[in-house]
Image (cartoon, rainbow, N blue to C red):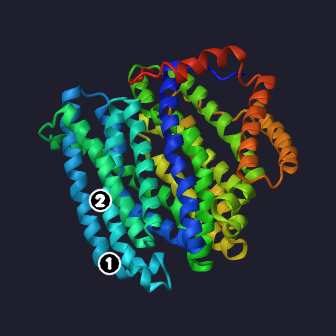
Amino acid sequence: MPIEPNSRFFRNAAVIGIAEAFARARALVVLPLIAHRFGATGYGVWSQVTMLALLLMPLVLLNSQTGVIRQFSVLDAEKQKQGMSAWLVWLFAAAAVWAVLVLLLRPWFASLFFPGQPELRALVPLAAANIFVGTLPVVARTWFRLRRNAFGMGAIPFGQAMIQILAVAAGIALGRGLYEIVALTILADLVWVGGLLLTALTRAGWRRPDFALLPSVLRFGLPLLPTAYAIWCLNWIDRLFVVHYRGLADVGIYAAAVGIGFVVIQVFATPIFTMYPNVATELYHKDAMTEINAVTRSSGRLSIALVLPSAVALWILGPRVLVLMGGAAFASGSAVIPVITLAYLVLAVANYDMVALGLVYRQHFTSVALALALAVNIALNFALIPRFGIMGAAIATLLAFCVQLAGVRWAAMRYVPGWQGVAFSWEVVLSAALMGAGLFVLDRWIAGMGWAGFVVLVCAGALLSMIAYLMLGVVTITQLRTAIPEMMIRSPRRMEP
């Protein structure tokens, strides 16, 4: 069955996807810069600083960004501005409180994230600063998402990526240490996202905050706070196990492998899903479940069609990628990349069911499913990481996300009238297998050609995937002829369902 087109939806996904592609190139650029300068251990430290900042972000946000989209989407423009002003003031106050708390508990955080490395305690204040700065892109992306401005949403990660790459490159060129480079990237974020948010607020016109709008936002978001922490744990807690069982060098290798796999999700699946909650919410208020299922089916199927072949390709090309990016010390992480890519594809599919549960105010089932997934993840981390190292961490993540998907799919099918969800396609699976077989042969033939060989193989993999999709009817020539010009040339600033 061919992928069903929804041109306006996917044109905006293409705009965000192009921006995300450039943004996620940051990981592919920063990895070799940090890895070749500071080694696997240095990249592990870099990863841990990011993880520490993200640890407290759910407590700052209280998952209110989902409440803003859910509650403000149906308000008029003036009320939206008043609500956003109130939300911005509240977030900045919360971020300041938690940043101070991190500073007061610096020894404890240092021992948790950098065990046996007392000299790294100085990085904790930078993580505290990053908590405050990290609220800016959340606010900016939520505002542009609320206004359904695809270009604004794309500008945030694109600018962040470019300016952070420049900051890292400048720090290394000047011979600075890891502390100074981390500080430069935080400052770069503040300048770019803060400036973009200030410009947006100036153009929209600052309104007097209407704090009366916040309780409904928090009532929607607070039941999902356990969800936010469960997601944090599913994404990051394995690194705490790895650092305590294996050390910072293994954390660096694992972080590099996860980062490469996650790039695929952020470039292909995330842009397609980003505007989906807005569209689903508005259609639900119009009692248009048939249209919701159509958008769900077509967007979810496209995500799978893009990500699954990428996972197969990364299974084959993983050793090339990590050696080229980080050096021979990182080669042991190559087998982790496809497992992590598949894990986050499962999560991407589960996100649709979580949105559906939110439509009928059954989001507590999302928390239950994630709690079960987290329990499985923690148990598997204890069982697998001491014996299998970073591969054990990757397998634990994949199985945990499968548990989560099973839970939210069951709840959505039971409690959301008419819900169908995203279905996996055997045609896509077979196409990915055919592409993988061809790419495997080419990889053995084009050996030892460095970056040139890698680029050739990537292009060959994309071509083989398209040929397989056309042969098996996943897409048609007619769809390609109409979709490509619409998505890449006629990209509008605003999206309509």
Q: Which is more foreground, mark 2 or mark 1?
A: 2
Q: Residue furthest left?
A: 208
Near mark 2 (Cα within 10 A), the count class, few <14, some 14-19 or many ≥20, is many
Near mark 1 (Cα within 10 A), the count class, few <14, some 14-19 or many ≥20, is few
In the rendered structure, the answer to whether residue 112 lies left or right of residue 435 reads left
In the rendered structure, the answer to whether residue 64 lies left or right of residue 472 reads left
Disc 2: which residue: 132
- Amino acid identity at mark 2: Phe
Q: Are marks 2 and 1 in contact (CB under 8 Å)?
A: no
Secondary structure under badge 1?
Answer: loop
Q: Residue furthest front?
A: 174
- Does residue 134 show up? no
In the rendered structure, the answer to whether residue 375 lies left or right of residue 214 reads right
Q: Residue at x 46, y 54 (%)?
A: 165
Residue 445's label in the rendered image is: none
User: Residue 492 occupies which quadrant of the picture?
Assistant: top left
The front one of 266 and 64 is: 266
In the rendered structure, the answer to whether residue 147 lies left or right of residue 495 reads left
The front one of 14 and 301 is: 14
- Amino acid identity at mark 1: Leu
Identify whether 189 is placed above or below 2: below
Identify whether 97 is placed above or below 452: below
Disc 1: which residue: 105
Tally of marks = 2
- Does residue 118 show up? yes
- Image quadrant for the C terminus? top left
